[in-house]
Amino acid sequence: MSKKDSEYLINRKDNQYEVVIGLEVHAQVLSASKLFSTSATKFGAEPNTQVSLVDAAFPGMLPVINEFCVKQAIKTGIGLNAKINKRSVFDRKNYFYADLPQGYQISQFKDPIVGEGKVILDMPNGQKEVGIERLHLEQDAGKSIHDLDPQNTFVDLNRSGVALMEIVSKPDLRSPDEVNAYIKKLRSIMRYLGTCDGNMQEGSLRADVNVSVRPKGSKEFGTRCEIKNVNSIKFMQMAIEYEANRQVDLIEEGKTINQETRLFDTKKNETRSMRSKEDAHDYRYFPDPDLLPLEVSEKFIEELKNDIPELPDDKKKRFIKEFKLSPYEANILVSDIDTAKYFEAVVAKMGKNKDIRLAVNWITGELFAVLNSKGLEISQSPVSAKNLAILINLIKNGTISGKIAKTVFELIIDGDKDPQKIVEEKGLKQQSDPKTLEALIDKIINDNREKAIEYKQGKEKLFGFFVGQAMKASGGKANPQLINEILKKKL
Amino acid sequence: MSDITKQSLTKLVENIRNKKLSSTDVTKAFIDRSKKSENLNAYITNDFTSALDKAKKFDQKPNLDLKLPGIPIAVKDLFCTKDIKTTAGSKILNNFIPTYESTVTENIWNEGAILLGKLNCDEFAMGSSNETSFFGNVQNPIDRNLVPGGSSGGSASAVAGQLTPVTIGTDTGGSIRQPASFTGIVGLKPTYGSCSRYGIVAFASSLDQAGPMAQNVKDCALLHEVISSYDPKDSTSIDFKRNHYSKELTNNIKGKKIGIPKEYRVDGMPKEIEDLWQKGIQYIKDCGAETIDISLPNTSYALPTYYIVAPAEASSNLARYDGVKYGFRAKGENLIDMYEKTRSEGFGAEVQRRIMIGTYVLSSGYYDAYYLKAQKVRKLIKNDFDEAYKKVDAILTPSTPSSAFKIGEKTNDPVSMYLNDIFTVPANLAGLPGISIPAGHDSKGYPLGLQIIGKAFDEQNILNIAYAMEEKINFKNKITDWWIK
């Protein structure tokens, strides 16, 4: 394997292979109630406590579309720069399973609510555009629990009927790193829009991964395999790596690749055949006769467009322009909506005489370090944006030094205290009175006459010694700039 | 009053309002007659004890402003009724007690009606003779061992036999109109979207409609007025202005143009049906309306189209009966085995046949040739009606190609059974209202019906035409009470 110019290729003897990846991402719509019923969707509720007669498919029960979920899907489509279809159709996907009460899943097959779109990825060697094939709405199934009883399977229908958006990419991805960037970008956009919380641990975001390989330079696609239901980015990357190499090995051995559905075994780090194309389900899709085609007006779409917040790509552009950030810094700040919100709150609280650079450094430095060590999200930050802004302003206006600021920061983490008060209470205010400092320095020079002479004779390294002595004598509070100036004058 | 059960719904309502009869009198009379009529096998489940309690309660504090004040009514066992077993005529739901009420039945209780019981029907409404019911044949009150038609066979038998003043049935391809015709009563299949499907065990969602069955047109209009309502719980329910059908009922149809479609003159149709139709044309003219020969060119494709669309939807609608959540469950070695045994034992032969047909026509590789093509033909059939309605206000046809047949006569010949629906399915495919009214007797003395098909949402018009014709026809059902113990 080589990563020349970040190109991801698989090498065998004389041959190089390119990997072609397409994703079908299942994103749970952020909605208080389900796609076709009024049941709640809260994660982690007691089994079968969020199930209506519709969700459990009782006789004579009928689905009624949840308009909010439709809005969420359209907003997501807008966020993906995609075509919104004014007319879409719900179909039934028929198959039997214990956790599928209706015996079919209501989905959209031929006419999805959202058509073609694109997302831009920021890769180390530049931007990459990934095509979106479509986005459609569908119901989630319930959950079968096989390990609670040796004889029986238990079924939890809380998830049954929860709205999902299936976002299908074009086969535009070429490496595990791009998949990583793509999933993160999708998640970022949806979190900005508030249409999916993107929580992979809770299963709000999972993906089927289509992988094929082809000789480098070839224009034709190889036979693809679909790896079902992978629920973390790391596993997606591992699965792709394994699967691509497996396919290359088959080609090298002169064997053929069977189009099939495979499962990724996270313990063994390998993919296994689940069913071949011949065994594929015949889902007998047909338009759900219980639901009329879904029609939305231009006005409806326009109103949603007006409701779209600034999205990561635009925010990034603005940060670069307005705050003179590097693309790299801007990326770090915009990729997660909560980070962006925090940064913007700090900027706003800093007031007129703000120092953006200090803010960026403090957020990506000290704050991120604390969050990391405590395992917290920025939304749970122990220091509010307001107090961080105050702290930064204290540095900016010379009240405290950067070094003292770090001490103050340590002190305000616990209980989100006001840095101004801490500085006053602990007497950490920087000494910037020239007379006091001159007296202090005079004493140090007096106490270290020999070193002062050595310095004057050309041992310039000793300047640092005097600075250190002065800072020590002031308890770290002396304004280092002033100390420098006075020392230069006096020595 | 010994003749209570002979009274029309309109008369009963009048007598209760005038306090000539109490709800208890009426309810008791229908319960007594229902009990003596076990030979008809019209009921699957009776709710007599509770009905009598409700009638007494009604009489203590009667609200006479209601449209169905204290009127006992038995309904087809396809409507989910809260706390009352609802089987759809199937073994697979033999133990199913809903915790909810269908909108249509809720509407009649809200107007003061009282549930008498649940009436027999073909299993999941799939049948034209009530012979596919898990709960056995229903006898036609007209004669011994005669089918009452289907699928609302128990409903038709119960109205004709005076076990209930009126009833509600469901009609997917003729399940109200054909049994109405076979038993000498009136049955209306409303416009698709007029009556809510919420809480009705689904057969074919794009075709199913609930509708009234009654002894006469006025009763039919009154009951329709009660059951038809816009319901947000059914996404296919339509919010249109509904008439006070019984109040606005008139026999003045002068100047109306009634179409006579030549394609309904099918090969092998008995002469007496043709004669009946001609008589009907004469009645129309006698009422001062005009008849116009029209063409509905795609009529011959209606039945095959129906037998693709309906089973396709049914195969999917019935997937929920899998033994997992409610209803009958057979023991199995594993999940698949349990499914197979539950559905093999729980569904009868006709239902299994239709599930298989439906599964087949939706299968990949066959979908385009069958289901998709059928949907296209369905559109053509609807276009035929649209064209015709540019020239006429309604269409007159026979209701069925024959009178009622003997029990067992067609059970081994599904195609000949399916042909029963030949005149009724087009209205379902086009979503149009159709009403069957008794119009005469055949040589055996069995009733024969005529059908009036209307424009969408134009129930008032076909009720008016039926009402005017009814007066001219002056049909008398020959009920001998042969089955009474």
Image (tube, coloured by chain):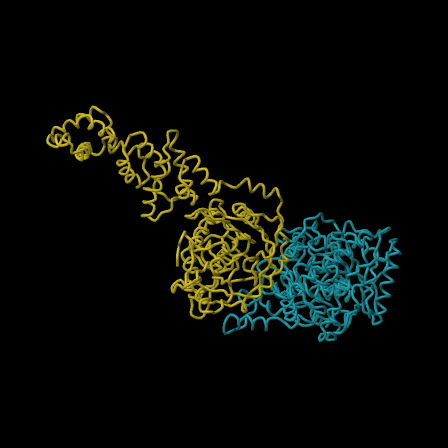
Chain colours: A yellow, B cyan
Percent across and percent down for residue B272 are: 85, 68
Q: How many marks?
A: 0
* Residue at 84% from the left image edge and 59% from the top image edge: B260
Vertical placement of residue B353 versus A51, above or below:
below
Nearer to us in this view, A268 or B209: A268
Q: What is the quadrant of the C terminus of chain B in the image?
A: bottom right
Nearer to us in this view, A196 or B342: A196
Left or right relative to A463: residue B459 = right
In the orientation shown, which residue stands out farthest toward the front? A14
Left or right relative to A419: residue B41 = right
In the orientation shown, which residue stands out farthest toward the left? A450
Percent across and percent down for residue B31 are: 69, 64
Nearer to us in this view, A56 or B180: A56
Left or right relative to B115: residue A247 = left
Task: Decide if residue B485 is in sight here.
Answer: yes
Q: What is the quadrant of the N terminus of chain B in the image?
A: bottom right
Percent across and percent down for residue A250 are: 45, 67
Nearer to us in this view, A133 or A439: A133
Quarter of the image where one finds residue A482: top left
* Residue at 81% from the left image edge and 61% from the top image edge: B397
Percent across and percent down for residue B115 are: 66, 60
Vertical placement of residue B411 versus A61, above or below:
below
Task: Decide if residue B163 is in sight here.
Answer: no
